[in-house]
Image (tube, helix red, strand yellow):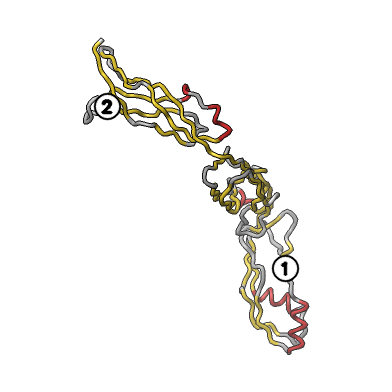
Amino acid sequence: MDYNLPMGKTYSKALPDAIELDIEASGWELLGFYLQFKKFNIDLEFENNEPKIINSISLKAKLQKNLSPDIKIIEFRPDQIEYVPDDKIEKWIPVLLKSNLQLADEYMLKDSILIEPKIVKMIGPATVLEKIDYWETEILQLDQVQNNFRHAVQLKRHALKNIDFQPNRIEAIGKVEQITEKKIEVEIQKRNVPDSLQLILLPNKIDLLCLVGISDYELIQADQFVVVADFDKIVKSKENKIRLELKDYPEYILKVNLTSKETDFIIRKK
């Protein structure tokens, strides 16, 4: 069923795509009816932008005028059509990519997945679009990813069929690289040591194991890490042991492991 809408107008409540009819006619008349009325146009007229209800009696009268007298319409379903008019507008909205990305073992995303375009034009009823701040895509499902990728992803459809997107899909772009491990020696920093005491760490350095993408391997330097021995956190249950904590490391590193979580120490008076 097609609806002829006034210029610049649309609807904010879903209209039926089809109507069901119970009719009474001979076999030949039924065949002619089927061939002639696969589509039925309804002109939607309104005053003062007010909602309008078209009942089955009105629909029946409109259709019956075009039918043979030998065809009798018994019943309509639905028994009425409610038309809620609205202004047709355009709105630019950001796109939110929904993805389920499974990387192969020992591979990582180099950066966040990029999307092109980041915003799309949404066309539809004003009262509906005004409440929309962003729009999601269908789920991008990728498994065992080892290489860079670029995939088209459809935007989710809106429940209202009179809402359109331009464009109706985006491109998802990802850079993938292999993960490697790097060991680096870092000096342990002392914290909260009383002025009257001297804290000697044995040893005063620790090895860190870093998981990182191959392209960032050479960027790793010892001064980018902060490993702390806090005097206030001396392990009292263990003789001459102090806990070590990793306080800072570069964002591009996936994971950092301390080869030991504590170290020996000696305390001396100054």
Relative image position of residue 80 (x, y in whole percent): 62, 71
Task: Tell me which residue sits at (56%, 50%) in the image.
Answer: 144
In the foreground, 183 or 234: 183
Q: Which of the 4 image quarters holds residue 231?
A: top left
In the displayed structure, does residue 159 sit left or right of residue 201? right
Q: Residues within 10 Å of mark 1 (few under 14, many from 20)?
A: some
| The disc label shown at residue 202, or none | none
Task: Tell me which residue sits at (58%, 51%) in the image.
Answer: 142
Q: Is residue 98 at all visible to an observer of this figure?
A: no
- Residue 239 vertical position relative to residue 53 in the rendered view, above or below: above
Relative image position of residue 182 (x, y in whole percent): 49, 31
**Quarter containing the N terminus:** bottom right
Q: Which residue is mark 2?
A: 241
In the foreground, 204 or 51: 204
- Residue 227 vertical position relative to residue 166 in the rendered view, above or below: above
How far apart, in angstroms, are the residues tagged by discs 2 and 1?
Answer: 85 Å
- Residue 129 vertical position relative to residue 6 in the rendered view, above or below: above
Q: Is residue 226 at all visible to an observer of this figure?
A: yes
What amino acid type should be assigned to the residue bearing mark 1?
A: Ile
**Quarter containing the C terminus:** top left
Check disc 2 and report its element: helix, strand or loop.
Answer: strand
In the foreground, 185 or 79: 185
What amino acid type should be assigned to the residue bearing mark 2?
A: Lys
Q: Earlier in the sequence, mark 2 or mark 1?
A: 1
Q: Which residue is mark 1?
A: 42
Relative image position of residue 154 (x, y in whole percent): 65, 53
Relative image position of residue 41 (x, y in whole percent): 74, 69
Task: Tell me which residue sits at (56%, 52%) in the image.
Answer: 143
Check disc 1 and report its element: helix, strand or loop.
Answer: strand
